[in-house]
């Protein structure tokens, strides 16, 4: 299992590894992901918010909420 798949699973979003892997989102990039980034991955709003809350708790979390 990939690191991103493990992280998603640990944070209640384990059914989304395929789009994250296909879009080459790993744990380093995850820190920069925004709500706008998650929308085209097919992640519903509630799950996007859960993922973003978990991203904010990552060490060296998102530098800001601005879009990159």
Image (cartoon, rainbow, N blue to C red):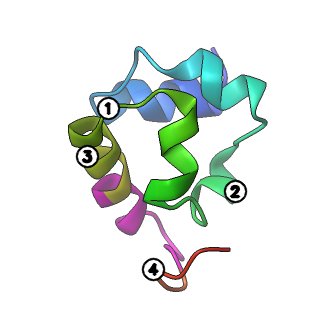
**Of callouts 2 and 1, the N-terminal one:** 2
> Which residue shows up at 37% across the image and 67% down it?
56
In the rendered image, which residue does mark 2 sit on?
A: 29
* SS state under label 3: helix
* SS state under label 4: loop
The range drawn in magenta is 53-62
The quadrant where residue 32 appears: bottom right
**Of callouts 1 and 4, the N-terminal one:** 1
**In this rendering, which labeled residue sits more in front, label 4 or label 2?**
4
The N terminus appears in which quarter of the rendering? top right
Closer to us: 40 or 30: 40
Residue 10 vertical placement versus 45 (above, below): above
State how many labels appear.
4
In the rendered image, which residue does mark 1 sit on?
A: 44
Q: Are marks 2 and 1 in contact (CB under 8 Å)?
A: no
Spatial separation of the CA atoms under disc 4 and disc 2: 14 Å
The dot on residue 50 is 3
* SS state under label 1: loop
Q: Position of residue 55 (x, y in %)?
A: 42, 58
The C terminus appears in which quarter of the rendering? bottom right
In the rendered image, which residue does mark 4 sit on?
A: 65
Residue 46 vertical placement versus 66 (above, below): above
The magenta stretch spans residue 6: no
Q: Are marks 4 and 3 in contact (CB under 8 Å)?
A: no
Q: Position of residue 47 (x, y in %)?
A: 28, 36
**Of callouts 3 and 2, the N-terminal one:** 2
Left or right, residue 58 beside residue 49 = right
């Amino acid at each position: 299992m990939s690191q991103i798949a493990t992280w998603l699973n640990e944070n209640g979003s384990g059914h989304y590894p395929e789009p994250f892997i296909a879009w080459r989102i790993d744990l380093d990039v995850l820190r920069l992901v925004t709500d706008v980034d998650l929308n085209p991955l097919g992640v519903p709003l509630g799950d996007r918010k859960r993922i973003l809350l978990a991203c904010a708790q990552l060490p060296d979390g998102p530098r800001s909420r601005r879009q990159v």
